[in-house]
Amino acid sequence: MITDTAVLPTMFPAAPTPPLPRPTSRLRQLGVDNGYALVSFPVVVGFVVVTGLSVGVGLLVIWVGVAVLAATLLAARGLATV
């Protein structure tokens, strides 16, 4: 059996990308950060609700799920008010 070693071409590192422009003031940065938090808020709410409902339904067999479902519904109602 003859084995050959493959010779790979050399890889040159990619040119560094220029840094993104930074906001000019702290107030602008605060606005950008708040916008990001507000956009991601529905994702967090969805994760909490879906996870709570899944765990609650899965645990209904041993009656712990009733408490988990009740807590999930209270959390979903509180997050909806926010």
Image (cartoon, helix red, strand yellow):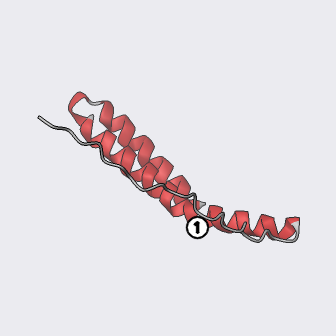
Q: Amino acid at mark 1?
A: Val
Q: Name the quadrant of the C terminus.
A: bottom right
Residue in the image at 30% along x and 47% along y: 6
- Vertical side of 27 occupied by 8: above or below: above
Nearer the observer, 16 or 8: 8
Residue 29 lies, in percent from the top left, at 79, 66
Quadrant of the image for the N terminus?
top left
> Residue 78 vs residue 18: left or right?
left
Nearer the observer, 82 or 4: 4
Q: Is residue 1 left or right of residue 62?
A: left
- Report x, y in % for residue 21: 76, 71
Q: Residue 9: name its quadrant.
A: bottom left
Residue 22 location (% of width, % of height)? 79, 68
Which residue bears the numbered disc 1? 39
Please, which residue is most extreme toward the front here?
2
Q: What residue is at 38 percent from the left and 35 percent from the top? A: 67
Residue at point 20% right, 38% down?
3
Is residue 6 or residue 68 the one in the foreground? 6
- Residue most toward the right? 25
Query: What element does badge 1 sit on?
Result: helix
